[in-house]
Image: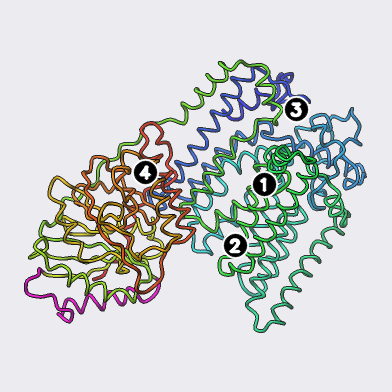
Amino acid sequence: MVVVGGTLAGAADPGGPGRLWAVPAVPVRPSVDLLPALVVYFGGLIILVRAWLLLRREHLIRNGGVPVLVVVGIIVVWALPMLVGPPLGSRDVYAYAAQGRLADQGFDVYDEGPGELGAGDPVLAPVDPLYWESPVLYGPVFVALSSAVSEITGDHVVAAVFGFRVLAVLGLVVTALAVFDLSRGLGRDPTDALILAIANPLVLFHLVSGAHNEAIMLAFLVGGVAVGRRRGPFVHLGIALCAFAAVIKIPALLAVPFIGWHWAVEADGRWRRWGRAAFTGLEAIAVMTVAGRLTGWGWGWVEAMADSRPVDAYLSVTRVFGGGLSLLTGLDGDLVVGGARLLGYLAALAVTAVLLLRDRQSWPTALAWSLLLWAVLHPTTQPWYLTWGLVLLAASTAGARNRGLVAVCAVAMFVVLPIGPQLGLVLLDNNSSSRLAVAFVALAVLTFSPRPVAAPRTRRDLRSDTVSVIVPTRHEQPNIEPFVRELIAATDSDVLAGRRLEILYVDDSDDDTPRTIRRVARAVAVGELPIGSDRGPVEVTMLHRQRVDRWGGLGGAVVDGFARATGSVAVVMDGDLQHPATDVGRLVGCIDGRTSLAVASRRIPGGSDGEGLTPTRWVLSRAAARLARTMFPRRVGRIGDPLSGFFAVDLASVDLNRLCPDGFKILIELLATHPQARVVEVPFRFAGRLQGMSKATANEATRFLGHLLDVRIRTTRWWAGASLTPRMVERSGRAIASS
């Protein structure tokens, strides 16, 4: 659908009978009515993106259930139509062919544009006239490759396109191998890395169909990073590969300081570190100099880039910002846009410096973010520029949720037309608003799907004489024994009298917290921590989740606790002593057969934040609660404190298959996915933290916003689609349990 729709919409010339596709003329002439052709084209994109989302969700739900060979086969099947169809999304590959022909004929491509070929040259005909006078802005290695393709294909433009596609496919094969190796070396899921990086529709569309030279650059860039993260002589090979990638396209040069600095900080002494850093720069310059000499093009490309004037790309953030500021202030447009572009460069440089100096252990991820930032702030931003960083980010974060990465790639697929933005003007000039509305509705239908109905997964093996207190922890070693003592002391109440108390720690710690939990559990078992004759038995158990099983953050730990707990009533509370143990009995007493969820609330009369929140966190907490209630006015808006982490629940009423939390706020997940639950609120006073540090960070705030959006999608009746958050409850079965 993508290839056929794009071909009919003007990516191929309509006057080419008997050919697979013919080279389009300038301006573009659609073969059929443009509107239905674009409906087919965008409809195909919708289906392709959803198929990609479903492939990744299937892989993660089944915990690596899609074999790597199946993923490779899917990539091949998706790529084949794009490999044989006309170039979609841009005309750059035609410009590559013209520039290669110019170089092959002996012109200085860094001083003259393709227009020197003459208007009658068939290779020049499909090139956008905007670029006829523009010199080449790519490195000498790509110019040499373009010249070689031109020498082989001559006047045959279609053959030249396929020549560049062969180079692009070879580059992607090498990139895929490097992604697989890098992700495995970083302890990530290599199959998921291939799904994110190579099966990505953005990569297939722009690097296979569009044959952009990013494919060749990425082969050396990702390969250099994969090699450079190793020690010894591999560091120098990695630097050389990344420097070589830069003489294909300059953004790859950014990898050199990241590899070099990572190597330099391992040295003893300041002078040795600076010496290694200087050697890194000299090594990169040497590689680039040799490449320029061997290709015969020297350093002319640097001067050409310095003298170039950016094209006014409609996707450029700095162009849009500068243009908008010019309209508001009345200042000279060129001056303001130039200033905005300069600010963009300075911002990208500053953030890159921070990432370089701070993220030593995770420098491939830091490099990926830096490349993405440069792509977004580039004066002529294009969707395929995102591949600079997304391939590395996919390799270094595979297996994580990556909602932002997935969403950006999915959206970026729809911001270009089959053969350039001029088609949009043709579309608006030749169609009424009613026809456009009908086409929009037709495409919107493809994004709809009923919410999938999963078989409920509820607990029926629960003990009515047991109350399970689920305590998610991470690095809370100093608080373990005080918490257990306080909880045991506070359970002398009529509600809990004679009932067995299970304190279940679900621990994600990498320090000595698990050892402390085991010590306290033994102390309770042998009576070193007295229980008292009027209380039921107390047992401390632990579910320690290894790194690979830590899905969903704190919320995922609570769901794993729900699956492991033995009591019919479960109380969820923090282990940092901010939730008063004296209120556990009050919450449990509210679960009476009709009420299935009792929430300890700070936002009703009698409740208070106390000393538990700083002024800044208080403001953010109020804003987050208001946002949650706004997005879910009936489900979450029925209580005053939806961000509470202290509540009791009737476990038999919880459908574990509905729960797919991400981050701290498991209560919002419960409320949104269980609208039938009857809820009551109990006031409580939030206490100050006695020991340890809060886990609330800017990253958790981002996860919270993403989680709200994900829950909104999952609980919407007609737009369930391919949820960006996979359900990974099955992973809890591999967690290591100990008591």
Earlier sequence position, callout 3 versus callout 2? 3
Residue 567 location, quadrant: bottom left
**Dot label at residue 385:** 1
**Dot label at residue 23:** 3
Earlier sequence position, callout 1 versus callout 2? 2
Q: Contact, CB < 8 Å: mark 4 with mark 1?
A: no
Q: Quadrant of the N terminus?
A: top right
Circle 1: element type: helix
Kind of residue sitting beneath label 3: Val
- For disc 4, the marked residue is 629
Earlier sequence position, callout 2 versus callout 4? 2
Measured Cα–Cα span from mark 3 to mark 2: 40 Å
- For disc 2, the marked residue is 364
Kind of residue sitting beneath label 2: Pro
Task: Examine the rendering and report whether any part of residue 96 can be seen.
Answer: no
From the viewer's perspective, is 216 left or right of 465? Answer: right
Q: Nearer the viewer, mark 4 or mark 1?
A: 4
Say few, some or many: other residues with alpha carbon within 10 Å of mark 3 (under 14 / 14 to 19 / 20 or more).
many
Measured Cα–Cα span from mark 4 to mark 3: 55 Å
